[in-house]
Amino acid sequence: MYYMKLGQVPAKRHTQLLGPKGELRYEQVVTTHGFDHRYACLYHLHPPTRVMEVVERPPQPIELVPQKVKRHVHLRPLGLKPGGDAISGRNPLLANADVTLAICRPTEKMAYFYRPGDCDEIIFIHQGQGTLQTWQGNIPFAEGDYLVIPRGTTYRFDFSGSADPEALARMLVIRTPSMIRLPSRYVNPAGQLRLGAPFYERDIRPPSLLQTHEETGGPWEVRVQTGDQFTGYLFDFHPFDVVGWDGYCYPWAFNIYNYEPLAGRVHLPPPFQQTFQADRFVVCSFCPRMLEDHPQAIKVPYVHSNVDSDEVLYYVNGNFSSRRGIGVSSITLHPSGIPHGPHPGAIEASLKATRTEELAVMVDTFAPLQLTTEALQCDQADYPMSWK
């Protein structure tokens, strides 16, 4: 990411920043990978270490289910009952040591602030709009936005509308203990996105409005997650008391509709649509695009055996031409070692097409994914036989 500054900061790091009456502001340095990667310096009205009380909150354990057979999986998570808020309402569906994938359809507003203590997050907004309120400023969001949130960020969702009649929003939540970053091949040695990358700095939306809250009294709760454990930290001042910050570590948004998909004369593999990378998994965006124009082109993906990766697709919108029985918000898992590909008739039906309108998010992992108990509740067990 690039350098950002909002609000008041001193001329040099680790020097005094004073308020209008000479009162000292309190510097907090947020670092990653020890002290060796991106960081940010935040300046508070109050010491962020000044805690009133520390309280236990209910854990949210992920219950993985041992799989007796390895098979293709089709989940219909809209069959799960919506509920909770943007944090407690998350239903984990697939997980390994590197990444957890969850669906969230909250029905309640957040009555607290949240901080992911040990994971970076990508939250894809399928339906809904509002503001991601963070201690580094506000980020308005709408349908199609990826919200990229580094661990250690204090934030809260404020929803203002959704096309989902049963929930405040519909979100795909990706959490990882590794750092989420841009694909290295998109970035030049100066740290700038290369010409020809599928998106540019102009498409990235960092916090734009820093609102410094001076309220005191409280209590205000910041709920910190580490693993499946949640701990409430209660403060007698508003946690968004930041008067300024600068650095490279901050949340940001990018809309999937601003992704510039690539197309070739014949079908290009998924890495050409990559959007994010992390340790041992990648995230790709399949967007509306022109189809292949070779006279004999097959215009749906070929049968594929990815012997090193599990492939997950979250279907957002459009006509999913290569898959039968797939609907909006369906999730498919095609595990390593088992071929997957177009359903019968899909190849023939695609030959005269010139464009696809499908929109999907793909996650490819290098370690096998396991299903959760929530996943079993929306599993379409006959999916492996759907190629008959």
Image: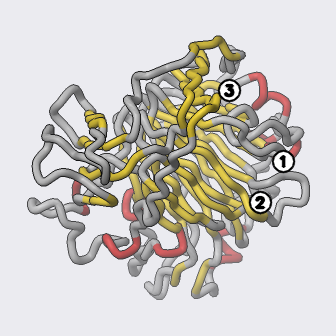
**Residue 88 location (% of width, % of height):** 72, 32
**Residue 106 location (% of width, % of height):** 78, 45
- Height in image: 280 above or below 373? below
Is residue 183 visible to the viewer in this orientation of the structure?
yes
Q: Bin the neighbour count of mark 2 within 10 Å (Cα to Cα): few under 14, some 14-19, many 20 and up.
A: some
Out of 76 and 182, give the one closest to the viewer.
Answer: 182
**Residue at numbered disc 1:** 78
| Mark 3 vs mark 1, CA separation in Å | 16 Å
- Height in image: 149 above or below 36? below
Q: Bin the neighbour count of mark 1 within 10 Å (Cα to Cα): few under 14, some 14-19, many 20 and up.
A: some
Mark 3 or mark 1: which comes first in sequence? 1
Q: Are marks 2 and 1 in contact (CB under 8 Å)?
A: yes
Asked if residue 175 lies left or right of residue 20, the reply is: right
Amino acid bearing label 2: Val
Mark 2 or mark 3: which comes first in sequence? 2
**Residue at numbered disc 2:** 328
**Residue 8 location (% of width, % of height):** 28, 56
- Height in image: 357 above or below 268? below
What is the quadrant of the N terminus in the image?
A: bottom left
**Residue at numbered disc 3:** 371
Q: Quadrant of residue 273?
A: bottom left
